[in-house]
Image (cartoon, coloured by chain):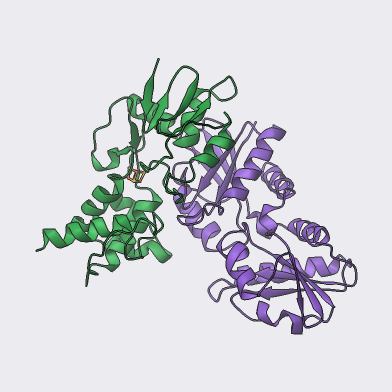
């Protein structure tokens, strides 16, 4: 039986992501984890759910590396959250609670406006295969529910809060810039957000 | 049996930052003394706030893989993991919270091992290199305490603390120590941004051994990446379980 979870294609004997290359990765959590740390463009993937998994690889499944272990290696807690969501026991935490409890470097994320929060979630979660049920998103049984804003979204909210008073001008996206370097002009998610904000307030 | 929850900082920008935590977790899983070994991170996944989701063990011990007892161990980890202190009872689960690996006195032994592996001899000086910060005096105290333990071991001619970000600064270490060879052991968790990049660059190191004005500076990998840190973690977890 073939099924997909996020970007992963799970077949009877293998797990992987389709693509032009046909690379075989050793069927162990360590090897697969190391492989999915970088995307096709060689950039580090700090967000496991980012829709940037490397393509064109598969890893053999077996008793010591079954489909569940493989899915949890690539998408930590995905199956736990699926099960808890289906059972109605998933602890869901709203964004406002997550931002309100931040301190130190991230304390300023809490001053981001309602509109900013909504757009930040749209941009960051829009690049992720998890479904932000903390934001009221729907999630089908085979989808991966996200119960609480992740640290990447919090970091984005912090930067977006710093842009509120005088938004930096949008720059062309530069795919060489680190995926989560939101303070750097050219970061793709930063530029998408700034562009959307500029258009909304034109 | 107990589930061990190893918590680390992680990074949004550096893929190596969490590598030591994953490596120690893999070692401890292989040893099989815990029911399960979980990992959680401030800036990676699973997040600190969700890492115990689905953990059904009645007994959990949380060990922070941090170098000193400071902002993260006192504020961020307890808040994110909803811990009440050294002991939390929640939903039939007992969660013990230990001090950080970096402040455990047995870490001095790991520093000494690192130095010896880099070829340190009895006539050499050991520079325990800490981050240092104006905000956290505990971090500074910990670096001095580790250097004192290395000195007390009597295995080297000199041992002392130097810092990346405060006095005595690492750039002055050839004035701090008199020995012909100074072995620098970074008291960091990972060979990440600082221990792996900025420190070697700022010290103009040419690899594991650098000659400077007729003297030798040896630079070791970060303490936190040493395989024997797994034993420090086990010891801490064991002491929490008593
Ligand atoms: S908060 Fe958004 S980006 Fe972060 S894991 Fe959840 S769905 Fe993905």
Quarter-of-image position of residue A64: top right
The answer to whether one can see residue B33 in this image is no
x and y percent of residue A147 in the render?
A: 34, 39
Which residue lies most toward the left here? Answer: A202
Figure disc tally? 0
Can you tell me which quadrant of the image ligand 1 is in?
top left
From the viewer's side, name the closer residue of A61 and B62.
Answer: A61
A194 vs A152, left or right, is: left
x and y percent of residue A26 in the render?
A: 58, 31
Which residue lies most toward the top here? Answer: A1
Q: Quadrant of the N terminus of chain A?
A: top left
The answer to whether one can see residue A23 in this image is yes
From the viewer's side, name the closer residue of A145 and B185.
Answer: B185
- At horizontal 31% and vertical 24% (from top left) the residue drawn is A141
Q: Which color is chain B depicted in?
A: purple
Q: Quadrant of the C terminus of chain A?
A: bottom left
Position above or below: A14 against B133: above
x and y percent of residue B30 in the render?
A: 69, 33
Position above or below: A124 against B25: below
B29 vs B14, left or right, is: right
x and y percent of residue A54 in the render?
A: 43, 40
From the viewer's side, name the closer residue of A59 and A5.
Answer: A59
Position above or below: B100 against B89: below
Question: Which chain can be seen in green?
Answer: A
């Amino acid at each position: 039986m073939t099924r997909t979870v996020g970007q992963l294609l799970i077949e009877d004997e293998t797990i992987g992501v389709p693509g032009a290359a046909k690379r075989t990765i050793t069927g162990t959590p360590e090897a697969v984890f190391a492989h999915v740390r970088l995307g096709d463009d060689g950039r580090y993937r700090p967000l496991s759910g980012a829709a940037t998994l490397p393509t064109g690889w598969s890893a053999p499944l077996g008793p010591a590396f079954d489909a569940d272990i493989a899915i949890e290696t690539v998408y930590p807690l995905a199956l736990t959250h699926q099960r808890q969501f289906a059972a109605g026991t998933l602890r869901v935490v709203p964004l406002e609670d997550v931002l309100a409890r931040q301190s130190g470097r991230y304390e300023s994320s809490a001053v981001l406006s309602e509109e900013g929060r909504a757009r930040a979630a749209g941009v960051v979660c829009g690049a992720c295969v998890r479904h932000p049920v903390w934001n009221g998103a729907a999630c089908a049984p085979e989808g991966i529910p996200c119960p609480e804003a992740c640290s990447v979204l919090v970091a984005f909210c912090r930067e977006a809060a710093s842009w509120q008073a005088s938004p930096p001008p949008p720059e062309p996206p530069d795919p060489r810039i680190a995926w989560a370097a939101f303070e750097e002009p050219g970061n793709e998610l930063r530029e998408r957000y700034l562009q959307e904000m500029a258009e909304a307030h034109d | 049996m107990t589930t061990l929850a190893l918590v680390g900082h992680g990074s949004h920008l550096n893929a190596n930052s969490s590598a030591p935590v994953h490596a120690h977790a893999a070692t401890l899983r292989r040893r099989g003394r815990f029911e399960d070994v979980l990992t959680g991170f401030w800036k990676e996944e699973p997040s600190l706030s969700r890492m115990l989701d689905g953990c059904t063990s009645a007994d959990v011990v949380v060990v922070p893989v941090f170098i000193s007892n400071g902002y993260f161990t006192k504020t961020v980890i307890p808040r994110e993991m909803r811990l009440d202190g050294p002991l939390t009872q929640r939903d039939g689960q007992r969660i013990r919270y230990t001090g950080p690996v970096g402040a455990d006195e047995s870490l001095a032994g790991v520093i000494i091992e690192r130095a010896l592996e880099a070829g340190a001899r009895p006539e050499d000086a050991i520079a325990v290199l800490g981050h240092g910060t104006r905000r956290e005096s505990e971090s500074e105290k910990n670096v001095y305490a580790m250097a004192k333990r290395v000195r007390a071991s009597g295995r080297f001619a000199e041992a002392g603390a130097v810092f990346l970000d405060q006095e005595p600064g690492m750039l002055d270490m050839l004035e701090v120590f008199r020995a012909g060879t100074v072995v620098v052991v970074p008291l960091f968790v990972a060979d990440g941004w600082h221990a792996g990049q900025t420190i070697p660059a700022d010290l103009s190191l040419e690899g594991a051994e650098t000659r400077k004005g007729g003297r030798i500076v040896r630079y070791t990998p970060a303490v936190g990446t040493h395989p024997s840190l797994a034993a420090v973690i086990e010891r801490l977890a064991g002491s929490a379980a008593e």
